Image (tube, coloured by chain):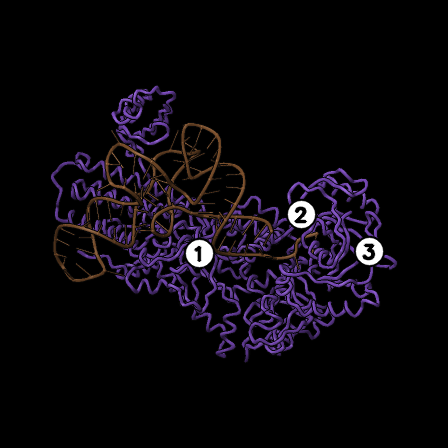
Chain colours: A purple, B brown
RNA sequence: GGGGAUGUGGUGGAAUUGGUAGACACGCUAGCCUUAGGAGCUAGUGCCCUUGCGGCGUGAAGGUUCAAGUCCUUUCAUCCCCACCA
C-alpha cells in the first residue's frame, strides 16, 4: 500500500490547478459574488514564516468554502513593493531596488504557491510596476484637483550626516537612530493629503462596519474628535488675546493660570523684559527635545516658566498668571490651555510644583476630583448646577458676550505623503516659476522612475531624483516655459489605498478600473489581516474610497465590509518571531521535513481560534500530519477492499448493519463542519473531522468495508469537508475514489435530517442541582414518562430517599432536576 | 492614565438560549502488532481520599438561580494598542 507522501502529490496538483485555471474569477452574475482579500504583502528579504502563512490560510479557507458553496469568488494576490528596505539594500549593494524586489517577489510567490492557496494569479499586481503606479499618480492628481493635496512648509527633523529627514520616531535622545549624530530641525516643504476634511465621515461611518470593536475604537481614538470651546483670555495691560481650547468650561471659575506651548507665537510678545532671558532659555531647551523625550517626561515631571504677564479670566475678570510649559502641545487645539489644577491632574501637578492656587469648583460624583462630573460650587451665578448643564449655559453666555465659540478639534493630522526617497511613485507635479505647482497632464502619465547612478539622498533635502537633470528639467504644461519636476516620491501607503480596486480590473490601461467591474466585485466582503494596519492603511484606504465616491467613480463609501484580524503566531517560547531573534519557522523547512503544505495549513488553524494568538508547537505539527495520514490510510484500505471484491455478496448496502452508523457519522460531521466553517470555527471544524475519522476507524474495526456505498459516500464527503483546509490530499484521494472533476469545483455536501435523529436519548438526572445519574428513554417520550423513569431509577431513588419532591425541573429531552 | 483582549487538566484548547465541564489534539501510561517507520492499532489519563451509589474543581471573593465556565458586583494577573489631545 502506498504511504502518504505530501511531496509526491502537492506539486503535482498545484501545477494541474494552475493549468486548468480553476481559481480564475470572471464577472459571472449567475452566482453571488464574494471578494475575499488578504493584505498584499511587502516582499521583504526575509522569507515568510508560519505567522504570515496563517493569514493566507484563513483567507484561503474562506475563499474555498464559499467557492464550493456556489459563490463566484475573487481571491487575488499582489505585491506592495515600494519601500525603504529595498532602497537601503540598493544603496548598500549599488544595484537597483528593482533587482532586490524581483528576487524577493519570486521567493514569496513560490512560498505562496507551495502552500496551495487558491489565488487567481492572472490578476497578480505589483505596486512598483509603472502600469500600476501610473494610476496611483492619477489618483494623486485627482486629490490635487479636488483641493485635497497641498504643499506646506513645516519643521522636520534632519540628519546632517545621513542627509535625510527623519520621522519623530527615528530620533532618539536628540540623535539620529542610524548614525548616532545629533539631528537638527529644518524647514522643508512637504506634500499633505487633507484627510482631516474627511474626519467626521471616517468617524461616523465606522458605525455600520462589521469590524472588531477594538479596531473601530483605535480608529475613533486616532481621529480623536472632541467637541469643546475656544475661549478668549485678554492679556492684562496688553493688546493680545490668548485663545484657549477646552472641553471643561464648567470649571471656568477654577482657572488659576494659563499655559502657552513653547512654540506659541504669542510667547515673544507677551513675555515681560524681566522674564525674557529665562523664557528664551526654556523655549530653546524645549525645541531641542524630541517629542519622544517630551512624552517620557509626561510621567515624571512637568516643567515651565512664568512669562511675567497676566490674563483676564472672562468668567470673573480675575487676573491670572500666564506660564509657558512643554506639556502643552502646539499641534493640538490652539496651543494654549487654561489651568484648572483642582480638576485636571496635569494642571494639578504643575500647580503643586510652582505653588499656584488650587481652587475647587465641583463637588464631584466620583472619588477623584479629576476629569469627573458633579455639582458646581464657588462659581458665582452658576452655583448648584450640574457640570453638564453649566457647560452649555456658560458657553451660551460667553458666545453672547463675544468671548467664546463652540469648536470641534481632532487629533488626526493631515497625511504627510511626500518622501525624499528613490523607491516610490514619483509625485506627478511640475513646479513652474510662473504657474506654481501644476498637475502633469493625464496623457503624460506615468511619470516613470528614472535609472539613477546612486540611490543615496542628495543632501539638500531632496530625493536622489533631484540629481537627474533629464528628469528634473521639463516644461510647464500650462505656459510652456522652463519648469522643474517634483522630485519627492509618495508614501507607500498611497499605493495600498486603492489596490483592492485594481484587482477587479488589473490589466486596464485606459483607466484605474472599469466602473462595471468595480461595481461587480467591490466592496471587499472579507478582508483578512493583522491588527497592525488598524490606523494607517485601513484609515487611508477608507479616505481614498470616500474621495472616489465623491468623484463619482464608485458606488460605495466603505471599501471593506467585513474585517477579520487573525491572531499572531508566536515562536514556541512565546516570543514574537523575527529574523533578528533567529526564531522564525518557515513553511519551506517544514515541507522539506516531509510534513507537507496540508499539515501546515491544518496546524495553522487547529492550534487555536483563528483570531487569537498562539505559540507554534512542533509536537502539534505531528498530530496534524497523523490525522491526514489516517485519512490517507483509511481511503487506501477502502480502495484495496473494493478492488479485491471484498464485501460483495449481492446484498444492498442499506441492508447491512454498518450502513447506518457510517451514514450517521458522515451526516453529523457535514452539519457540524458546515456550521463551524461558516462561523469561522476552524479549529472545531477540524476537530469534528478528526472525530469522523475516529468513528470510521471504529466501524471498520467492527465491520470491515461492508456497505461499500456508504463508505464511498462517507469518504467522499469527508474529503469535501477537508478540501478547504487540506486541498492537496483531498484532491488526490477524491480522484482515487473515482471522481472525474476537481474536488475544489464540486458542490459542498449537505446533511440529511433523517440520519441525525436517534431512537433513544440520554436524559441527565439531577437531585438538588447535582448530577446523580442518567436514564435512556425513547426519543420523543413524554415529560411524564421521562420524569417517572428518572424518579424510579434505583440510584436516583436512593438519593431522594422518600423525601418529598418539592419541584421538578424538566428540560425537554435533556435533563430532569428534582428539588427535594 | 485611556482603550481593547485573555485567564478552564501536565500542554494547546472544547462547551447554542444558563442545563452531563474538559470535545479534539499534544504529552504520558499500558497492551497488541510489524513491510522497524517520524511507525501503526487498541485502551486509559482533571484533582483528592483509590472507603462511596464519595468529595473538590473553569484566576480570586461575593451574589442571582432548581441549576453558573456562561449572568451581576468587586478584585487580581497577563498580553496588545494609544498615550501630557486640555
> Is the C-beta separation of discs 3 and 2 under 8 Å?
no
Label 1 vs 3, first from the N-terminus: 3
**Looking at the picture, how far across and down is residue A18, in whole percent?**
35, 59
Q: Which residue is mark 1?
A: A568
Q: What's the CA distance linking mark 2 and mark 1?
A: 36 Å
Q: On what subunit does the disc labeled 3 rest? A: A
Q: On what subunit does the disc labeled 1 rest? A: A
Label 3 vs 2, first from the N-terminus: 3
Residue A777 relative to residue A491: left or right = left
Q: Nearer the viewer, mark 1 or mark 3?
A: 3
Residue nearest the observer in this picture, B60 or A31: B60
Q: Which label belongs to residue A311?
A: 3
Q: What's the CA distance linking mark 1 and mark 3?
A: 53 Å
Q: Is residue A527 visible?
A: no
Q: Which residue is mark 2?
A: A371
Residue A243 relative to residue A198: left or right = right
Amino acid at each position: 500500500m502506498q504511504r502518504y507522501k505530501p511531496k509526491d502529490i502537492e506539486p503535482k496538483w498545484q501545477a494541474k490547478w494552475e493549468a486548468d485555471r480553476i481559481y480564475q474569477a470572471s464577472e459571472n452574475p449567475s452566482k453571488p459574488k464574494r471578494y475575499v482579500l488578504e493584505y498584499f504583502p511587502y516582499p521583504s528579504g526575509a522569507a515568510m514564516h508560519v505567522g504570515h502563512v496563517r493569514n493566507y490560510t484563513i483567507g484561503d479557507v474562506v475563499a474555498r468554502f464559499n467557492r464550493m458553496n456556489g459563490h463566484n469568488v475573487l481571491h487575488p494576490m499582489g505585491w506592495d513593493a515600494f519601500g525603504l528596505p529595498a532602497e537601503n539594500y540598493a544603496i548598500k549593494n549599488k544595484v537597483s531596488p528593482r533587482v532586490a524586489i524581483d528576487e524577493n517577489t519570486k521567493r514569496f510567490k513560490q512560498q505562496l504557491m507551495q502552500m496551495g492557496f487558491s489565488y487567481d494569479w492572472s490578476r497578480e499586481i505589483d505596486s512598483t510596476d509603472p502600469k500600476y503606479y501610473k494610476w496611483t499618480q492619477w489618483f494623486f492628481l485627482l486629490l490635487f484637483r479636488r483641493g485635497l493635496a497641498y504643499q506646506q512648509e513645516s519643521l522636520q527633523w534632519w540628519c546632517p550626516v545621513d542627509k535625510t529627514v527623519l520621522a519623530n520616531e527615528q530620533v532618539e535622545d536628540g540623535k539620529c537612530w542610524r548614525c548616532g549624530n545629533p539631528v537638527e530641525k529644518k524647514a522643508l516643504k512637504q506634500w499633505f493629503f487633507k484627510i482631516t476634511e474627511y474626519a467626521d465621515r471616517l468617524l461616523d461611518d465606522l458605525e455600520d462596519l462589521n469590524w472588531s470593536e477594538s479596531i473601530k475604537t483605535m480608529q475613533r481614538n486616532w481621529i480623536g474628535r472632541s467637541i469643546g470651546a475656544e475661549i478668549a483670555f485678554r492679556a492684562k495691560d496688553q493688546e493680545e488675546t490668548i485663545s484657549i481650547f477646552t472641553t471643561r468650561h464648567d470649571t471656568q471659575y477654577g482657572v488659576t493660570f494659563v499655559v502657552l506651548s513653547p512654540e506659541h507665537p504669542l510667547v515673544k510678545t507677551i513675555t515681560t523684559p524681566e522674564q525674557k532671558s529665562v523664557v528664551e532659555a526654556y523655549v530653546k531647551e524645549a525645541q531641542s527635545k524630541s517629542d519622544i523625550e517630551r512624552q517620557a517626561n509626561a510621567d515624571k515631571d512637568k516643567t515651565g516658566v512664568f512669562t511675567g504677564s497676566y490674563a483676564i479670566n472672562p468668567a470673573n475678570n480675575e487676573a491670572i498668571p500666564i506660564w509657558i510649559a512643554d506639556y502643552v502641545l502646539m499641534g493640538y487645539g490652539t496651543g494654549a490651555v487654561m489651568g484648572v489644577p483642582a480638576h485636571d491632574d496635569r494642571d494639578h501637578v504643575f500647580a503643586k510644583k510652582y505653588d499656584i492656587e488650587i481652587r475647587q469648583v465641583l463637588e464631584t460624583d466620583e472619588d477623584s476630583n479629576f476629569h469627573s462630573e458633579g455639582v458646581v460650587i464657588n462659581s458665582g451665578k452658576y452655583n448648584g448646577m450640574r457640570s453638564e448643564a453649566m457647560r452649555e449655559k456658560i458657553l451660551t453666555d460667553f458666545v453672547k458676550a463675544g468671548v467664546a465659540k463652540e469648536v470641534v478639534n481632532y487629533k488626526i493630522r493631515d497625511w504627510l505623503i511626500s518622501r525624499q526617497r528613490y523607491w516610490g511613485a514619483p509625485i506627478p507635479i511640475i513646479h513652474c516659476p510662473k504657474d506654481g505647482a501644476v498637475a502633469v497632464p493625464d496623457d503624460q502619465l506615468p511619470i516613470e522612475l528614472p535609472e539613477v547612478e546612486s540611490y543615496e539622498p542628495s543632501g539638500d533635502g531632496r530625493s536622489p531624483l533631484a540629481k537627474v537633470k533629464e528628469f528634473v528639467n521639463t516644461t510647464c504644461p500650462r505656459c510652456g516655459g522652463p519648469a522643474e519636476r517634483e522630485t519627492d516620491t509618495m508614501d507607500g501607503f498611497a499605493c495600498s489605498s486603492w489596490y483592492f480596486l485594481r484587482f477587479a480590473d488589473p490589466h486596464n490601461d485606459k483607466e484605474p478600473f472599469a466602473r462595471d467591474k468595480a461595481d461587480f466585485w467591490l466592496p471587499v466582503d472579507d478582508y483578512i489581516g493583522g491588527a497592525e494596519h488598524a490606523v494607517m492603511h485601513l484609515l487611508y484606504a477608507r479616505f481614498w474610497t470616500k474621495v472616489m465616491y465623491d468623484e463619482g467613480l464608485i458606488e460605495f463609501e466603505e471599501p471593506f465590509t467585513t474585517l477579520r484580524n487573525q491572531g499572531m503566531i508566536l515562536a514556541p517560547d512565546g516570543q514574537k518571531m523575527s529574523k533578528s531573534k533567529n526564531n522564525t519557522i518557515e513553511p519551506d523547512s517544514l515541507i522539506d521535513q516531509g510534513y507537507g503544505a496540508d499539515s501546515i495549513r491544518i496546524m495553522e488553524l487547529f492550534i487555536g481560534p483563528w483570531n487569537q494568538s498562539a505559540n507554534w508547537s512542533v509536537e502539534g505539527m505531528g498530530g496534524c500530519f497523523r490525522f491526514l495520514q489516517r485519512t490517507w490510510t483509511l481511503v487506501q484500505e477502502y480502495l484495496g477492499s473494493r478492488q479485491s471484491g471484498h464485501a460483495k455478496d449481492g446484498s444492498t448496502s442499506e441492508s447491512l448493519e454498518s450502513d447506518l452508523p457510517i451514514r450517521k457519522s458522515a451526516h453529523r460531521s457535514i452539519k457540524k463542519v458546515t456550521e463551524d466553517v461558516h462561523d469561522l470555527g476552524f479549529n472545531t471544524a477540524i476537530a469534528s473531522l478528526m472525530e469522523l475519522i475516529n468513528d470510521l476507524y471504529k466501524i471498520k474495526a467492527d465491520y470491515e468495508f461492508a456497505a461499500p456505498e456508504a463508505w464511498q459516500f462517507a469518504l467522499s464527503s469527508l474529503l469535501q469537508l477537508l478540501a478547504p483546509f487540506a486541498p492537496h490530499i483531498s484532491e488526490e484521494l477524491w480522484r482515487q475514489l473515482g471522481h472525474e472533476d476537481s474536488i475544489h469545483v464540486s458542490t459542498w455536501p449537505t446533511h440529511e435530517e433523517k440520519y441525525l435523529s436517534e431512537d433513544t436519548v440520554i436524559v441527565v438526572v439531577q437531585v438538588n442541582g447535582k448530577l446523580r445519574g442518567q436514564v435512556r428513554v425513547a426519543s420523543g417520550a413524554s415529560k411524564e414518562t421521562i420524569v417517572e423513569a428518572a424518579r424510579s431509577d434505583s440510584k436516583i431513588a436512593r438519593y431522594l430517599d422518600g423525601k418529598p419532591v418539592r419541584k421538578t425541573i424538566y428540560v425537554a429531552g435533556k435533563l430532569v432536576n428534582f428539588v427535594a
